[in-house]
Image (tube, grey):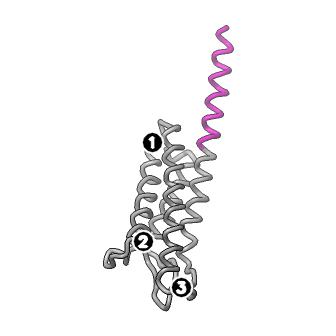
């Protein structure tokens, strides 16, 4: 499991996903917007940022342990990418909603993008593994004929 490079990519993506939850992602109207602080508020967009961020990190974590089922790994990675895109969209919308016109992105805003990058790298590694397995299977069956 750990000897595959895509496991490392998913682990790094998971670290960035969890870091996003606990780091500020924007400053809007002098207020620091942080996902974890949404628990206290009742804004549905803020809760959506928190929920989709946690779900994306969860699916990335689960994907690491599904190394025997590469098709499921790719599908869960795609779902995690979709959740990250929704997280980014809700985060931008919420930041613009707090005080329009006075938004400044913070360092935490880069974490979902970096997480997406590492998930793409992991998916590329899985596809390379699948291609290698198909080529080995072709060679094995060709010898029997």
| Of the image marks 3 and 1, the number of the one nearer the N terminus | 1
Q: Main secondary structure of the magenta part?
A: helix
* Left or right: 36 in relation to 63: left
Task: Say left or right for 52 vs 39.
Answer: right
Q: Which residues are magenta?
A: 126-145
Pick the quarter of the image with the C terminus: top right
Q: Is residue 72 above or below residue 52?
A: above
Within 10 Å of disc 1 (Cα), the crowding (few <14, some 14-19, many 20+) is: some
Label 2, secondary structure: give it: helix
Give the Cα separation between the discs numbered 2 and 3.
15 Å
Instruction: Answer few, some or many: residues within 10 Å of disc 3's Cα (few below 14, many 20 plus, some between 14 and 19).
Output: few
State the residue at coordinates (59%, 47%). Answer: 123
Residue under pointer 2: 45
Residue at horizontal 33 percent and vertical 76 percent from the top: 42
The front one of 41 and 54 is 41
Q: Which mark is residue 100?
A: 3
Can you give x and y, in whole percent of width and height, for residue 110 in the image? 58, 71
Picture coordinates of residue 98 (x, y %)?
46, 83
């Amino acid at each position: 499991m750990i000897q595959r490079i895509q496991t490392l990519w998913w682990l790094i993506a998971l670290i960035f996903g969890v870091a996003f939850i606990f780091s500020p992602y924007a400053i809007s109207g002098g207020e620091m917007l942080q996902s974890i602080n949404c628990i206290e508020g009742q804004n549905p967009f803020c809760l959506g940022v928190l929920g989709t961020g946690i779900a994306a990190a969860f699916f990335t974590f689960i994907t690491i342990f599904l190394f025997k089922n590469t098709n499921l790994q790719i599908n869960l990675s795609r779902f995690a990418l979709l959740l990250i895109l929704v997280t980014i969209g809700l985060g931008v919308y919420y930041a613009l909603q707090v005080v329009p016109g006075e938004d400044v992105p913070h360092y935490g805003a880069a974490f979902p993008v970096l997480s997406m990058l590492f998930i793409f790298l992991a998916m590329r590694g899985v596809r390379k593994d699948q291609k290698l397995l198909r080529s080995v299977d072709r060679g094995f069956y060709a010898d029997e004929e």
